[in-house]
Amino acid sequence: MISSSVLSRNRLIDKAEKFDLKRFVLETLTLLTTGLILYYFASTATENLVDQGIASGFGFLHQEAGYAIGETWITYSPSDTYARALLAGFLNTLYVTAIAIVFTTIIGTLIGIARASSHWLLSRLSAGYVEIFRNTPLLLQVMFWIALMRQLPSPRQAYNPVTGLFLTNRGIIHTVPVLNDYLYSLILAFIAGIVLATGYALWRRKRLYASGRSLPFITIVLPLIIVPPVLVWLLGSSSLEFEQPVLKGFNFVGGLTYSPEFLALVLGLVAYTSAFVAEIVRSGIQSVDAGQKDAARSLGLRGSLILRLVILPQALRVVVPPMTNQYVNIAKDSSLAVAIGYPDLVSVGNTAINQTGQAIEILFLMMIVYVGISASVALIMNRYNKRIALVEKP
């Protein structure tokens, strides 16, 4: 029987034989060279800052910003610090990115399905959309949408297509529910319904895989989502209150306002990226073998069921990786907000740079934020891609 000391000695011999001196030297030299380059740039930047009388470091973040931000999701005033101003810009960037990703996914998927459709007119219209928006620069599209928004009438002559909705060159204003205990109860009931519906869907799929018997889906899921908030509405002692927009002076007061800059940025990102997503979805659908569709038809499945149960689940494995790139592009392209005056992170950061001169520190913070957003999106999509990937059994 081989002793443990002999096995340990053999392992050491194997490691010694595998040691690559050339590779070790090259990696060491690369590491040292990279370190020297970084040290040179850092020392040069520090010397230039000292010569210009600019203090380095992040101490400026605690100083008073002294400038206003037009749109914020947190309370902010010019007397707040630069740190809070940058936080407000970051939240605006995050909000635009999230909204654009949701609408891009929905619109791009629908156009991609239409693009792969056998319906001649629907396919050609979808192809025209893709060719127009994919081959037009994003910045040009954003500028087009902001110019279009500014052609809307002033608040005094606002379009009022439905009650409580006003279209003006100051933005789109509409009625919004007042946040009170009753509204919170409705929201919690709706969330509870979604949780119940999700639990039922998971249990239904598990039962289907175990027994091969399918239970109703829509007729069960919809009541699970709708019934809890309806019960709260029926049994509640109060009612919803709405804040109506009212014209006072030269603008509306109250309600919820979406600025022209926000709308132009979101429309530009969605219209542009949806064209790329549509092509990704189309290629994913066309990657599914035609025999899969023929087999589904032979089983008597309708076209909608073939698409939902056979084609899309298989196309998803092809679609998800390139979709990740498009989501990351949305996060990065949102920085074009600076061209139309929307106060995103880049716009707020540029103002801070002009006032403090701390260009290196602020640009470094911007880089960290965009890397963090991109890495988070990639991590979520990669986990999802791993989950739906085919697993080969040994």
Image (cartoon, rainbow, N blue to C red):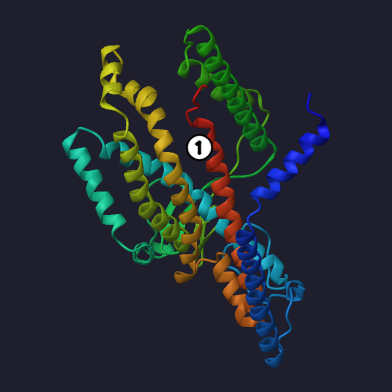
Residue under the point 28% across and 50% down: 130
Q: Position of residue 26 (x, y in %)?
A: 60, 65
Q: Quadrant of the N terminus?
A: top right
In the displayed structure, does residue 334 sit left or right of residue 310?
A: right
Q: How many marks?
A: 1
The single residue placed furthest to the bottom in the displayed view is: 51
Does residue 289 lie above or below 248 as drawn?
A: above
Residue 309: percent from the left, percent from the top? 39, 22
Badge 1 crowding class, 10 Å Cα cut-off, few under 14, some 14 to 19, many 20 or more, is some
Residue 29 location, quadrant: bottom right
Query: Where 2 sits versus 164, above or below?
Result: above
Residue at horizontal 55 percent and vertical 11 percent from the top: 207
Callout 1 secondary element: helix
Say what amino acid the circle numbered 1 marks. Asn
Q: Nearer the viewer, residue 238 or 42?
A: 42
Q: Residue at x 35, y 43 (%)?
A: 280
Q: Find the residue positioned furthest to the left.
A: 120
Residue at numbered disc 1: 385
Q: Can I make out residue 163 in this image?
A: no
- In the image, 140 versus 27, the foreground residue is 27
Q: Based on the displayed image, in which of its 4 quarters is residue 106 positioned?
A: top left
Query: Which sits in the foreground, 32 or 289?
Result: 32
**Picture coordinates of residue 105, whole percent (x, y):** 43, 43
Q: Nearer the viewer, residue 76 or 359?
A: 359
The residue depicted at 26 percent of the width and 40 percent of the height is 115
In the rendered structure, the answer to whether residue 120 lies left or right of residue 27 reads left
Q: Is residue 268 visible?
A: yes
